[in-house]
Amino acid sequence: MQRVRKAVIPAAGMGTRFLPATKAVAKEMLPIVNKPSIQLIIEEAADSGIEEVILVTGRGKTEIVDHFDAHPQLEEILRRAGKEALLREVLRPSQMVKISSVRQQRPLGLGHAISCARHLVGNEPFAVFLPDDLVDAKRPCARQLIDLYERTGKSVVALMNVPRAETSSYGIAAGSADLHDPRVVDIKSLIEKPAVEDAPSTLAVVGRYVLDPSVFDWLTRTNPGRGDEIQLTDALAAMIQAEGLLGYLFEGDRFDAGDVTGYLLANLNWARKTPRIWTSLLQYVDTHRGSEGDGG
Ligand code: UTP
């Protein structure tokens, strides 16, 4: 079985749910505590054994690539000032994995964005990370999927149970649980953002995938679907019969950082890991509890 060494991170979307913040700033650069959210994603990739990341960017997204580049001038200033801890933080993003980028000329959909990375992925399995989905897990979420891929040779999508009323916001999978491992689902059908009454289950696809390179051929054959965009879900749905597709109910907490509430919750989750910050937040909440919406 070929090892999963590469990852594609599509980050060329417009981020409309986060306007006006995302008018001139890439949403992937909005911080979770003191790191841009995209750094948490690339840390998960590195911790999952990924060696090379391909960022799919678009207009106004060059700052993402800059963040993962070396900054000799800043490094020298910190070195001279003896600020070793800060220097390590500044160096870290450029040292985690090899990064390259490709532009998606027009936002024609997630499936199209992934196709743009085809020549850099080549003929090997690869992971996909949607940068909106932050997962806090003991064993990195992508690693959980990669282990299943390397055991079975089948493409894998991350799954999470959601309330039925929320099924219309996700790709929804239907299938049967594996007898030996209840976290593994043999997917029989997949549908992008169904009406709640049409959802075949409450198993939602979240933004981690490990894909066989054959997905590129399926994407080529996929016509624009929902929102007139080329949808990854449609290509995966077409792939099921010919190649099989597994779902994995990953262990960990997932936050949708592309949505304002999910983003704030993610900040709280990661702030909890720094006692000094967490204590101040709890004090603030204690002081202001019961004064919601008073504008002050
Ligand atoms: P979303 O559908 O969440 O779109 O894309 P978005 O633009 O990022 O956010 P909203 O909904 O307008 O607020 C899912 C993922 O696919 C990428 C996005 O960057 C995001 O990571 N994407 C989407 C592309 O790279 N290109 C596209 O054409 C569409």
Image (cartoon, rainbow, N blue to C red):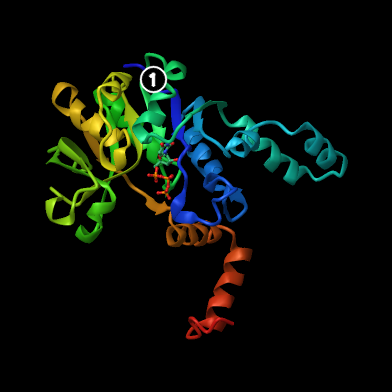
Regarding mark 1 in the picture, which secondary structure is present there?
loop
- Residue 45 visible? The answer is yes
Q: Position of residue 65 (x, y in %)?
A: 60, 33
- Residue 48 visible? The answer is no
Q: Choose between 55 and 178: the one closer to the eye.
A: 55
Q: Residue at x 17, y 28 (%)?
A: 240
Q: Choose between 285 and 220: the one closer to the eye.
A: 220
Residue type, mark 1 in image: Arg
Q: Position of residue 103 (x, y in %)?
A: 51, 28
**Which residue is denoted by mark 1 in the rendering?**
3
User: Is residue 63 found left or right of 141 in the rendered image?
Assistant: right
Q: Mark 1 Cα within 10 Å, few/some/many (few <14, many 20+)? A: some
User: Is residue 45 found left or right of 232 in the rendered image?
Assistant: right
Q: Residue at x 43, y 36 (%)?
A: 107
Seen from this angle, which residue lies furthest top? Answer: 123
Q: Position of residue 270 (x, y in %)?
A: 52, 56
Mark 1 vs ligand 1: CB below 8 Å:
no
Split into 4 quadrants, where in the image is the N terminus? top left
Q: Choose between 52 and 232: the one closer to the eye.
A: 232
User: Is 284 located above or below residue 122 in the figure?
Assistant: below
Number of numbered tags placed on the structure image: 1
Quarter location, residue 219 = top left
Q: Residue at x 44, y 29 (%)?
A: 8
User: Is residue 4 found left or right of 166 in the rendered image?
Assistant: right
Q: Residue at x 56, y 28 (%)?
A: 97
Quarter location, residue 142 = top left
